[in-house]
Image (cartoon, helix red, strand yellow):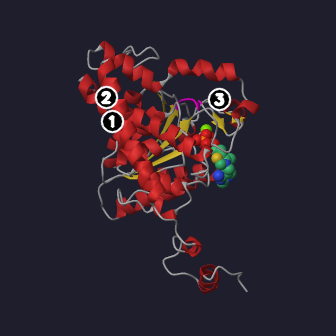
């Protein structure tokens, strides 16, 4: 017998769970002050999540998907991107959207069921939240392919979950991306759960990153609770994409510290102790410890930051709550450039407040 193929999957980590550097830091991370924007963005994401959940619990927001514990994935990948890149997010990427310039009140509008929240003022090229699992992976290939043939700068950055990697759309997307060598980066936010299905029951594959190997593209694993590692890994993958070296899959290992969404009760299917043990890997505490040890962060700075972020979020909530709701017929306005005749009739019926037909 002759060995015809073999592969290795590499894992990247710079800061361990205690905030200690375990490898030489990449260039952008050597000046601790330069890491403060990443820290701020993770804290903002966590505060935004908490506020969104409070609004949902008091009947002022629809279902919301928190990224508690996964802030380093969502902020790290966005920090690696350039403005001309295109983000194709799932419903768990508030942090990336906020970093990219979507306003918190626009995100609240979206989660409040108002489509104008997806028509954000900027970044105009980014996609809205994709709820159909893995659908955005296919869109990402299209975006990256278009950029390639039109010789436009930038790459597509697609985010999906561990569960999404079992979906056919994920395999089809990475397969096409590999064949066409498009500038796309697929970041798999492996938070270990797909609603109530644990990673162990999701797939027999040893890693999710190795799924890339079958598509002929690099697959790597990164500590998803280490924002430096996430940013660095995505930056390198984007650099390869820009250099015409094709797509990559990055599996970011993290943990969903709370319910799947506000419509879920994770206490019914997972052990509270196993969850609380995961707090030891909290990405925010990890970076704070690192910054504090480097003399770049203090208790005062933390207090000022929290005050500033609370004020920013409160102002966004006010703007959101003060936005007059759209009339019911607006539900027809955001899918088609030109409304098909049957829907046009329904739109008129809805605007009259009556029954169709
Ligand atoms: C095509 C499709 N099937 C099923 C669902 C219902 N659903 C919503 S989220 C989810 C689990 C996704 O898990 P994962 O990809 O790990 O992402 P996570 O929610 O953990 O971030 C499922 C099955 C859906 N939205 N789309
Ligand atoms: Mg998941």
Image location (x, y in percent) of residue 70: 51, 33
Mark 1 sits on what residue? 308
Image quadrant assignment for residue 277: top right
The residue at which mark 3 appears reads as: 1
Residue lying at 52% horizontally and 37% vertically, measured from the top left: 50
Q: Which mark is residue 126?
A: none
Horizontal and vertical percent for residue 147?
Answer: 36, 60
Q: Secondary structure at mark 2?
A: helix
Quadrant of the picture in which ligand 2 is shown = top right
What range of the chain is rendered magenta? 253-257
Q: CA distance from mark 1 to mark 2?
A: 6 Å
Task: State the image coordinates of residue 51 (x, y, percent, origin top left).
Answer: 50, 41
Local SS, label 1? helix
Lateral position of residue 222 relative to residue 103, left or right: right
At which x and y percent is residue 72? Answer: 44, 32
Kindly identify the residue that appears in the image at 32 percent across and 42 percent down.
Answer: 239
Camera-nearest residue between 90 and 172: 90
Separation of marks 3 and 2 at Cα, in angstroms: 65 Å
Could you say which is closer to the camera, residue 118 or residue 79? 118
The residue where tag 2 is placed is: 304
Pair 3/2: label in front: 2
Is 254 magenta? The answer is yes
Q: Mark 1–mark 2 contact, CB under 8 Å?
A: yes
* Secondary-structure class at tag 3: loop
């Amino acid at each position: 017998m002759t060995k015809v193929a073999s592969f290795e999957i590499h894992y990247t980590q710079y800061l361990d769970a205690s905030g200690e550097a375990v490898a030489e830091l990449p260039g952008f991370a050597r000046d601790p002050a330069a890491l403060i924007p990443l820290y701020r963005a993770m804290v903002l994401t966590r505060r935004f999540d908490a506020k969104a959940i409070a609004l949902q619990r008091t009947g002022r927001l629809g279902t919301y998907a928190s990224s508690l514990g996964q802030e380093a994935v969502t902020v790290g990948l966005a920090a690696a991107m350039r403005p001309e890149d295109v983000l194709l997010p799932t419903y768990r990427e508030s942090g990336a959207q906020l970093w990219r310039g979507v306003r918190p009140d626009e995100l609240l509008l979206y989660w409040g069921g108002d489509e104008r929240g997806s028509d954000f003022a900027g970044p105009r090229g980014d996609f809205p939240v994709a709820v159909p699992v893995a659908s955005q992976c296919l869109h990402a290939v299209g975006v990256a392919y278009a950029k390639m043939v039109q010789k436009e700068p930038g790459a597509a950055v697609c985010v999906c979950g561990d569960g999404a990697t079992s979906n056919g759309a994920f395999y089809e997307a990475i397969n096409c991306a590999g064949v066409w060598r498009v500038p796309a980066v697929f970041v798999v936010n492996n938070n270990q759960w797909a609603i109530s299905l644990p990673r162990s029951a999701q797939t027999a594959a040893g890693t999710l990153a190795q799924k890339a190997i079958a598509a002929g593209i690099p697959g790597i694993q990164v500590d998803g609770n280490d924002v430096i590692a996430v940013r660095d890994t995505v930056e390198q993958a984007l650099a390869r994409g820009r250099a015409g070296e094709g797509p990559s899959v990055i599996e970011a290992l993290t943990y969903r510290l709370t319910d799947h969404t506000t419509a879920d009760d994770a206490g019914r299917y997972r052990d509270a102790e196993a969850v609380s043990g995961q707090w030891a890997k909290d990405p925010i505490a990890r970076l704070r410890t690192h910054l504090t040890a480097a003399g770049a962060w203090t208790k005062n700075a933390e207090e000022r930051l929290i005050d500033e972020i609370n004020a920013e979020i409160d102002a966004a909530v006010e703007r959101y709550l003060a936005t007059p709701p759209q009339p019911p017929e607006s539900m027809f306005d955001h899918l088609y450039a030109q409304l098909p005749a049957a829907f046009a009739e329904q739109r008129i019926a809805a605007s009259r407040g009556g029954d169709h037909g």
